[in-house]
């Protein structure tokens, strides 16, 4: 038999190196293990010292309970720990470390010095370890606590060392580990030094919000709201989340903790995004600092050596608890954005919620409102405002934007003629059956809009029900010479609308409504606001169907042919059953053409081709088969966007008044369905500061 097939016991040194490969990936991994040991040792002060991003020196000093001199050698043995005693302890872990291989693994691949003095002892002890060779303990003088120094990391594992990145990258990982442990433990004094310079000094007994501000900046802390949620008494969710006015281009500012331990969980990440659905534009992520507190016997942390992943006994309960806690907080919070004018001068758009970097510090946004060019050439101001608007609130990637762009490139002329395309030319009955008050059953206190009451519907784009169907009327102040809603070019008293509270509202630039509010001035995006109202009305009318099952469909007198691209045709053929569940009967017609023979009975007044394309787009984008209700929701988004009043269209005063009334009754009127804000509030205090009245 070949020698390669003989089973041998590996030497202890090799076992330790294998364990180190699982646990010690980079210098930050060492910091994580040592800081967690210090926290478990009940330290009140933990200092981390790093040289050359940790490749030359890593040192962690704490004032915890310490290690007795006669136990120093045991601390460096593999799988030696004081944190568990029997098998049952593995199912109720209350400490960070419990495997007992961290110190042994670190000592195997570095030059390590361990000094410690236990509580009640007058002096401490010290041991050194060079690549696994441990010296005998010797006495040393030091206060109660532990000091661990690690030099020349990976000196005897060159394969691992060559994968270490640049000092800047490695130091970023070290800082991230430091932050993940400092956030959930504001009762501990943390210090981080790099190359002799203090980068973080976090005093003990800070509030959680003060700790967040210390680690990041005041704008982040000011932009947070506190979340406290409880599920059946034994699961508590607490912490801070950002309001929709503050978001990031990635999810790196999302910190989820389980009993103070940083974790990653795809299900909880999904719950976060669901909580912000319709409040953030696509590819923006909220800032989150949340801790889930629950009994340790309800989850298993012994899943991965890095202990970043956990398994919950009831993951659905945790998912719904997290989602519900955030949504309930938002239901009680004013989500309308308030602009901090002074921040425009420094190159960012802020709200009172503290979104300090919405625009990514783009140079197009760094403007000085007192610059002479703004006083001389208004076109320059408008151009930069448009650039800033496009930058901060880009069009949604699903193709729906304020101009009514089609759901795919090359379809129509980039905009739908709602009069002809939705209702057909010469349809004298257009809108006659619509305008049903779909909010009439709402609690009068369930309001989150702009004011005090709710009244008549908007002419254009209001939603009603007739024989089981939904239609979208289209009479909201279109500027046409033959239209009753035409607004004259000159401003007259008849062009001023009034909110239910008697505040004046006027249209500006044929796209924004300007209105006085209780604390300042509101600038309202007419398209975004109207789109949200239509979307919510459509959802309410189809509420009985969302519970499940197939949608009823109505056959078309004449099937509608639709020419598709090869990719679109393939997607349709792969999802015929899914489309049928949504009430859309589609069949191949030859080549890349399909015919639509029936439509969902709940929706009418929208072209069959548009309905199909609105369903194809999310399938192309995700590459997977989404839930039918998700597809239906996307279709409602598209309908609302197409039917809403567009930027560039004039509105008559009574149409403006009706829009404001409906906004006051809709609790989600602060954002359009795609997550763009529908209004910006310029507070009176901010205006007074800008005009130097304060």
Image (spheres, rainbow, N blue to C red):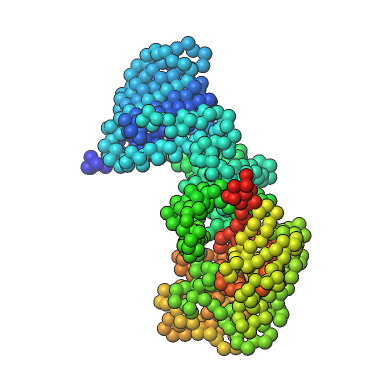
* Looking at the image, residue 66 lies above or below residue 272: above
Q: Considering depth in this image, is 163 or 77 the residue closer to the camera?
A: 163
Q: Decide if residue 693 is in sight here.
A: yes
Task: Judge from the rendering whether residue 78 lies leftward or rightward of residue 533; answer left or right.
Answer: left
* Looking at the image, residue 92 lies above or below residue 390: above
- Residue sitting at x 71%, y 81%: 432
- Residue sitting at x 42%, y 54%: 363
Quadrant showing the C terminus: top right
The image shows residue 126 at horizontal and vertical percentages of: 38, 17
Q: Considering depth in this image, is 166 or 621 the residue closer to the camera?
A: 166
Task: Judge from the rendering whether residue 533 lies leftward or rightward of residue 245; answer left or right.
Answer: right
The image shows residue 673 at horizontal and vertical percentages of: 59, 63
The image shows residue 45 at horizontal and vertical percentages of: 50, 25
Task: Judge from the rendering whether residue 66 lies leftward or rightward of residue 315; answer left or right.
Answer: left
- Residue sitting at x 63%, y 84%: 482
Task: Judge from the rendering whether residue 496 lies leftward or rightward of residue 216; answer left or right.
Answer: right
* Looking at the image, residue 647 lies above or below residue 58: below
Quadrant showing the N terminus: top left
The image shows residue 691 at horizontal and vertical percentages of: 59, 50
Q: Considering depth in this image, is 539 or 509 the residue closer to the camera?
A: 509
- Residue sitting at x 50%, y 74%: 406
Question: How many numbered marks does the figure carry?
Answer: 0
Q: Which residue lies furthest to the top in this view?
A: 122
Q: Decide if residue 268 is in sight here.
A: no
Q: Which residue lies furthest to the left in this view?
A: 2
């Amino acid at each position: 038999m070949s020698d390669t097939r003989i089973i041998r016991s590996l030497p202890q040194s090799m076992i330790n190196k294998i364990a180190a490969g699982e646990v010690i990936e980079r210098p930050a991994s060492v910091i994580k293990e040592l800081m967690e040991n210090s926290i478990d040792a009940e330290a009140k002060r933990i200092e981390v010292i790093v040289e050359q991003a940790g490749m030359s020196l890593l040192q962690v000093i704490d004032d915890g309970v310490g290690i007795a001199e006669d136990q120093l050698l045991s601390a460096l043995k593999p799988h030696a720990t004081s944190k568990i005693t029997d098998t049952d302890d593995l199912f109720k872990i209350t400490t960070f470390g419990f495997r007992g291989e961290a110190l042994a693994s670190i000592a195997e691949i570095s030059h390590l010095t361990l000094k410690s003095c236990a509580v009640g002892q007058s002096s401490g002890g010290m041991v050194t370890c060079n690549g696994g060779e441990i010296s005998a303990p010797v006495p040393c003088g030091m206060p109660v606590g532990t000091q661990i120094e690690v030099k020349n990391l990976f000196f005897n594992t060159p394969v691992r060392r060559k994968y270490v990145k640049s000092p800047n990258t490695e130091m970023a990982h070290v800082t991230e580990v430091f932050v993940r442990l400092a956030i959930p433990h504001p009762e501990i004094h943390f210090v981080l030094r790099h190359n002799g310079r203090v980068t973080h000094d976090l005093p003990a007994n800070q509030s959680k919000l003060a700790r967040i501000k210390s680690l990041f900046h005041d704008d982040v802390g000011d932009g947070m709201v506190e979340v406290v949620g409880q599920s059946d008494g034994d699961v508590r969710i607490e912490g801070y989340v950002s309001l929709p006015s503050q978001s990031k281009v990635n999810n790196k500012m999302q910190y989820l903790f389980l009993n103070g331990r940083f974790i990653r969980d795809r299900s909880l990440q999904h719950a976060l995004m669901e909580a912000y659905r319709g409040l953030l534009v696509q590819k923006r992520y909220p800032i989150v600092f949340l801790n889930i507190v629950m009994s340790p016997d309800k989850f298993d942390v012994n899943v991965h050596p890095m202990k970043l992943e956990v398994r919950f006994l009831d993951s659905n309960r945790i998912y719904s608890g997290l989602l519900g806690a955030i949504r309930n907080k938002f239901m009680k919070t004013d989500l309308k954005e308030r602009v901090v004018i002074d921040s425009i001068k420094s190159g960012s758009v802020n709200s009172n919620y503290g979104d300090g970097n919405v625009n990514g510090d783009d140079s197009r946004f760094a403007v000085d409102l007192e610059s002479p060019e703004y006083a001389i050439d208004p076109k320059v101001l408008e151009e930069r405002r448009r650039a800033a608007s496009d930058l901060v609130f880009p069009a949604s990637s699903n193709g729906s934007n304020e101009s009514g762009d089609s759901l795919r490139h090359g379809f129509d002329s980039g905009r739908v003629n709602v009069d002809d395309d939705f209702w057909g030319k010469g349809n004298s009955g257009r809108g006659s059956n619509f305008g049903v008050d779909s909010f009439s059953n709402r609690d009068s206190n369930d309001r989150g809009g702009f004011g005090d009451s709710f009244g008549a519907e908007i002419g254009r784009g209001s939603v009603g029900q007739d024989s089981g169907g939904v239609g979208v009327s289209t009479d909201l102040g279109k500027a046409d010479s033959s239209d009753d809603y035409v607004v004259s070019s000159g401003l007259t008293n008849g062009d001023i609308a009034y909110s239910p509270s008697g505040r004046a509202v006027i249209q500006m630039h044929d796209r924004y409504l300007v209105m006085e509010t209780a604390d300042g001035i509101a600038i309202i995006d007419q398209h975004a606001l109207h789109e949200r109202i239509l979307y919510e009305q459509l959802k309410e009318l189809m509420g009985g169907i969302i519970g499940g099952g197939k949608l009823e469909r109505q056959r078309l007198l004449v099937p509608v042919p639709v020419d598709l691209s090869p990719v679109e045709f393939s997607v349709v053929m792969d999802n015929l059953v899914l489309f049928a569940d949504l009430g859309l009967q589609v069949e191949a017609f030859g080549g890349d053409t399909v015919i639509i023979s029936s439509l969902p009975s709940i929706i009418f007044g929208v072209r069959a081709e548009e309905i199909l394309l609105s369903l194809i787009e999310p399938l192309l984008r995700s590459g997977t088969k989404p839930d039918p209700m998700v597809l239906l929701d996307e279709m409602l988004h598209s309908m609302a966007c197409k039917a809403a009043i567009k930027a560039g269209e004039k509105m008559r005063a009574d149409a403006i008044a009706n829009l404001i009334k409906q906004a006051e009754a809709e609790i989600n009127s602060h954002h359009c369905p795609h997550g763009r804000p529908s209004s910006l509030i310029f507070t009176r205090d901010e205006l007074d500061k800008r005009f130097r009245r304060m």
